[in-house]
Amino acid sequence: MKKDTQCVHSGSYRDGETRGVNTPIFTSSAYDYLDRDDTPYPRYFNTPNQDAVVKKVCALEGAEDGVVFSSGMAAMSTAVLAFAGSGDHIVLMDELYGGTHAFATDQFQRLGIGYSFASTDAESLCAAVTERTRVIVIESPTNPLLSVIDIRKVAAFARERGITTIIDNTFASPMNQNPIELGIDIVVHSGTKYLGGHSDMCSGLVVTSREKMVRVRTLARHLGGSLDAISCYLLERSLKTLALRVGRQSENALRIAQFLKGHQGISRVYYPGLTDSPGYAIAKSQMKAFGGMVSFELDGQPDTTKFVRRLRLISPAVSLGGVESTICAPAVTSHLKMSAAERKRIGVTDSLLRLSVGIEDAGDLILDLEHALGTVQT
Ligand SMILES: Cc1ncc(COP(=O)(O)O)c(C=O)c1O
């Protein structure tokens, strides 16, 4: 099946009795254990609604097995800790989502895990590997600067050395990038973003090989960050339109990035689909389209709050990936916990805005940006 078809059909649970076309919502947290081996239990990640979501995302990512979590951070933290413990070392990209960055800086030392941050290029990342490195964590495109890293290079380097690779594929979504095909071991998603797609639920996924999943599932059962049946149902329903939503968001984002690039009120645009973007060649070699996220800097000493307040269609909001366009200033939202010096070092400036492009008409969104840019400049 092609991906558009997988979005609709893969994993769905057909109820033989009613023959309804949708997976029923199984709210039971207690199941008959007689005459069966793997009795469902929500925290064991094996209920019918959890299975339906996991099968769909596994189909989309080309993975063998997976687990659906209650948040993206539950997914990321479980995946990382399943493969690294006291005495081990982890290499991470410095441009990671702020929550993943904070997880490393707040927790790894206490757990006896050594770690190094490397800049967003395959050479720097590989150079940061030591004899004790067990895990490499990457994100591509990154939040919020949309940098891309050569995934094939990192994966091949790590595989030769028996190092487990984990990628946060949230920004690309499975429609635009499939890292397992590029050699990555473990794919993590914040399902709160594109997979959920309607800004109304929180979830996360880890998908990988059957072999690697054994460790992830064991730790996941101990840590317990599972997703309830109703949220699983919502997520499964949303995934049916993932191809349509992300296709439209990617088209809109490219048009908006091109518009912003030509506007005198904008000093810099970050979008891997712009042909003069530093990551364009790599992005083109590993992504199908370039996704719905565009970041940009207002020119001069701008008041980003004033600009955001002038927008009439695009809403100020911290999350991303919904059908509605939203915008935020990373320095005071997703990257607030990072020190000002560190933010400056990785390029998250005070004039940076991160736009999550929705499925609205691109012309309407451009008019909204044009209006706000005009009023900010006067
Ligand atoms: C790229 C990325 N990864 C992971 C997360 C964490 O996801 P969640 O909030 O579902 O835990 C986020 C949240 O903003 C994100 O943007």
Image: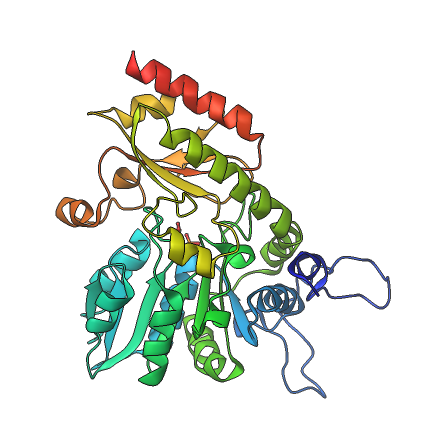
Check the image and report above or below for 239 versus 327: below
Estimate the x, y position of residue 18 in percent, counting from the top left: 86, 62
Left or right: 11, with 302 as reference point: right
Is residue 294 or residue 50 the one in the foreground? Answer: 294
Residue at the location (64% across, 71% down)? 30
Residue at the location (56% across, 47% down)? 246
Left or right: 221, with 116 as reference point: right
Residue 192 in sight in this render: yes
Residue extending furthest top? Answer: 378
Left or right: 29, with 158 as reference point: right
Residue extending furthest left? Answer: 341
Q: How many marks?
A: 0
Is residue 264 or residue 81 the one in the foreground? Answer: 264
Estimate the x, y position of residue 130 in percent, counting from the top left: 19, 79
Estimate the x, y position of residue 349 in percent, counting from the top left: 22, 39
Check the image and report above or below for 104 versus 270: below
Which quarter of the rendering shows the N terminus? Answer: bottom right
